[in-house]
Amino acid sequence: MRQLQSRNCQRWCLITTHLVPRTSGLCKKTEMPFPGSCEFRPRILIDVSKIDMSTTVLGFKISMPIMIAPTAMQKMAHPEGEYATARAASAAGTIMTLSSWATSSVEEVASTGPGIRFFQLYVYKDRNVVAQLVRRAERAGFKAIALTVDTPRLGRREADIKNRFTLPPFLTLKNFEGLDLGKMDMADDSGLASYVAGQIDRTLSWKDVKWLQTITKLPILVKGVLTAEDARLAVQAGAAGIIVSNHGARQLDYVPSTIMALEEVVKAAQGRVPVFLDGGVRRGTDVFKALALGASGIFIGRPVVYSLAAEGEAGIRKALQMLRDEFELTMALSGCRSLKEITRDHIVTDWDRPRLLHPPALPRL
């Protein structure tokens, strides 16, 4: 993934999808788990000549529990943008999630051919715009809505501020063309932050999850849950699933990495809805860890964008195949022939080990 990230990437990758450091001064930004936070407990002498990685998500059969997360403005990375991502996901037999802020519309992505696709939704102040967008996604054959709930305001993205980030004039937010909402104006700091402040509804609450169910029959995934309390509320609100996400560690400092928040959310859901992990996955071993902690599947974001920038559709296909191969090997070496055989007993985490709050003083010599 690191090779793909650094290879042939346009300047966009350098200024907008910068790797978030694990610590930045006193402000902790964590997307990926700390090294050694999960270790494997493989089982041996099991016939692993056949490995089945297929699974079902919201009733849809996919080839592996590795799906594509919503990432915005993909034509900044490659001219084919979301078209390439949709084709690569379909070829891999998995799910693509299209961002509200895509540079290709729901209709354009649907035109690339068959595939299982979800639509990520930001709730705008103008609810007519939201209702219209949801209906368009439904008509275009999208199978679920991933409602982002962690962005009433945009986090302080210092790289965007430094670069005065905005959408280039030759691109638009295609889903909002014709609504006078497709362009992003220049600003003194971040054009994206100004756009969010002007358009996104800060009053969004749990009652709006109920409202969304009145305007669509599509299942609704609540994206951005990190705590047991919110997991229980999501179930009560009628969510069809929960996506554990910290928005790529770009919203609030000092939140846990997704892998560290996952188990708390899974336990709170109590099997009533599936729980997915979005963010921090870079290897097939990461996929195995997430499933062992109770996730029904994972979504990848940055690896897709890096691969898209490096090699377009072929790059994304290669990244998905890499993750698939690594995950299959991890299953085999852990003695798991199907996803249902991956259990909590296959890993041990740092938080499993007892911690000494006050270690005993060493004897004086």
Image (cartoon, grey):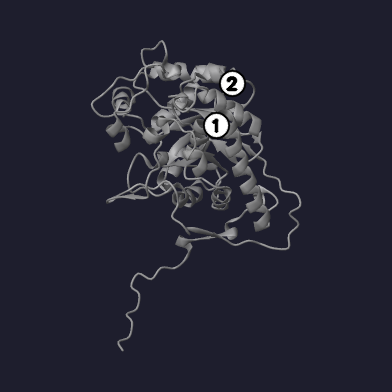
Residue that appears at 38% across and 42% down: 249
Which residue is situated farthest in the top direction here?
A: 178
Q: Are marks 1 and 2 in contact (CB under 8 Å)?
A: no
Q: Residues within 10 Å of mark 1 (few under 14, many from 20)?
A: some
Mark 1 or 2, closer to the camera: 1
In the rendered structure, which amino acid carries the disc numbered 2?
A: Gly
Q: Which residue is mark 1?
A: 311
Task: Report whether 26 appears left or right of 305.
Answer: left
Q: In x, y percent, where is residue 75?
A: 47, 24
Q: Quadrant of residue 57?
A: top right
Q: Residues within 10 Å of mark 2 (few under 14, many from 20)?
A: some
Under tag 1, what secondary structure? helix
Q: In x, y percent, where is residue 312?
A: 55, 29
Q: In front here: 229 or 338?
A: 338
Q: In x, y percent, where is residue 76?
A: 44, 25
| Structural distance between the alpha carbons of marks 1 and 2 | 28 Å
Q: In x, y percent, where is residue 266?
A: 51, 48
In the rendered structure, which amino acid carries the disc numbered 1?
A: Glu
Residue that appears at 35% across and 75% down: 359
Q: Quadrant of residue 233?
A: top left
| Total marks placed | 2
Can residue 196 be seen by looking at this rendering? yes
Residue that appears at 57% across and 49% down: 291
**Where 212 sits versus 305, above or below?**
above
If you read the primary sequence from the N terminus, does the residue marked by circle 1 or circle 2 appear first? Answer: 2
Task: Report whether 213 appears left or right of 337.
Answer: left
Q: Which residue is mark 2?
A: 141
Q: Quadrant of the C terminus?
A: bottom left
